[in-house]
Amino acid sequence: MTFLKDLFGLLKERKKWWLLPIILVLLLIGVLVVLTSTTAIAPFIYTLF
Amino acid sequence: MIKNFLKNAGLLALGCLAALLLLEIFLAFYPPLAGRVRGKKIILFPYKHYVIENTRFPKIERHIVRSNNSLGFRGPEPLPPGKKALTIIAVGGSTTECFYLSDGKSWPEQLGKELAGSFHPVWVNNAGMDGQSTFAHQILMSDYIVKLKPRVVLFLTGLNDMGLTSANRFDSLLTDNIGRPLPAKLLVWAASKSRVFALLQNFLLYEKAIKAGLVHAQLDLKTMKTAHVSKERLAALLKEHSAGAKAYAKRLEGLISLSRANGIEPILITQPLLCGKGRDPSTGANLELLEAGPEFGNCAAEWDVLQLYNDQTRELGARLHVTVVDLADQMPKDSRYYYDTAHYTAEGAKKVADIVYRDICRPLAAISPATYTGTCPGKGRP
């Protein structure tokens, strides 16, 4: 949490807001890797089509 | 100041683009969800293998092993080309796929084992996919199954078409551009080009399935709430769904025509549900009054609506001389065969296979006499 706070502070201080989407995507990738390494995500393939 | 703002906005746009590209590259190498829809296409996953430690559904096994073959379907590998065989593919939604049953236990695979006693050689594959409606079946048929040229296709249909209330709303999602709002058009277009948007599209379709109350669930019939549906509400529901049922019949007729135009004999199967009149013999629960979500109110109303769709299947079978297995009528309404109101336990899948086998064995013998070994149940010539 502190790391995220520091990171946000850095973006604010240096005005590097353009890095924010890249950081968010890296976080999302991390979440996807962790979630899909277990099988809990399997039901999400139920797509009404 | 304006110059500075424009510079920052440009940098942010570049950052977004870089992020999108990064995610796109990641998804190309590591598709996390095996999303089955991309734009207007169905994606199959050959050799996809799932090992699921099941903690959600006590009625089915704890350790589930579920694999796809080289075609992306469940069941044995295709026979060598040129070999004269009775080849059958089962098409349907989750009640055909039987996602949470291990390899060999889905009803089409169990049916294959039963048919092996009456036909030689015989090959049965399970092309069922969670959430697929008759519209998706048309795509699956055109893009994949017609090219495989099976002798017979079994269609277990109705439930996923029923979940979509009106014919117009549903059809507007199916046709290219007519009636679909611009954001939806853009999403479908973007999803066909980009894995990021395809992932988003799959999440939206999943949300749609949840809203329609179609996803897998473990139900405890003993503790489920009950609900009453007035005669007026039921009449309104039936009226509302009559247009949807007619649109469904039209699509099913299209599937029959498409099959026959390609030398494939269709067989229709009506959709059973653990709902309707009477009590569940295993728990004593009243199958009429069980609560069935905001759309239907209770289980009896849901069953009555589903029967509108099943009636279309029956009527179509009679009119077009297509064999119909009336599974909806023959499947016992007993919770030992279901882990929710629609999806089968392994025992239920075996029961489905038994019923389908009994009803299609003789018609199949007439379709493929060269492979028939003369052991269909019942009397008389096929």
Image: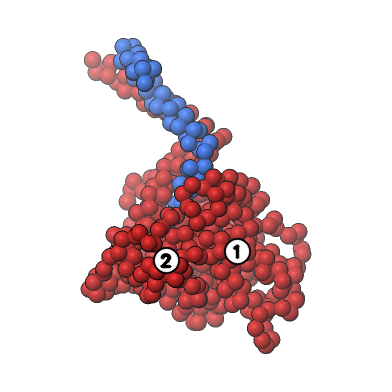
Chain colours: A blue, B red
Residue B62 horizontal side relative to residue B296, left or right: right
The residue tagged with tag 1: helix, strand or loop? helix
Q: Secondary structure at mark 2?
A: loop
Q: Residue furthest top?
A: A14
Q: Picture quarter containing residue B145? A: bottom right
Lateral position of residue B82 relative to residue A2, left or right: right
Q: Position of residue B24 (x, y in %)?
A: 49, 34
Label 1 chain ID = B
Q: Name the spot of residue B63 as percent of width and height, x first.
A: 57, 48
Q: Residue at x 49, y 73 (%)?
A: B332
- Would you say residue B237 is visible in this rendering? yes
Residue tagged 2: B283
Residue B238: image location, x then y, percent: 31, 72
Q: Nearer the viewer, residue B105 or B287?
A: B287
Query: Numbered disc 2: what chain?
Result: B
Q: Which residue is mark 1?
A: B108
**Closer to us: B6 or B110:** B110
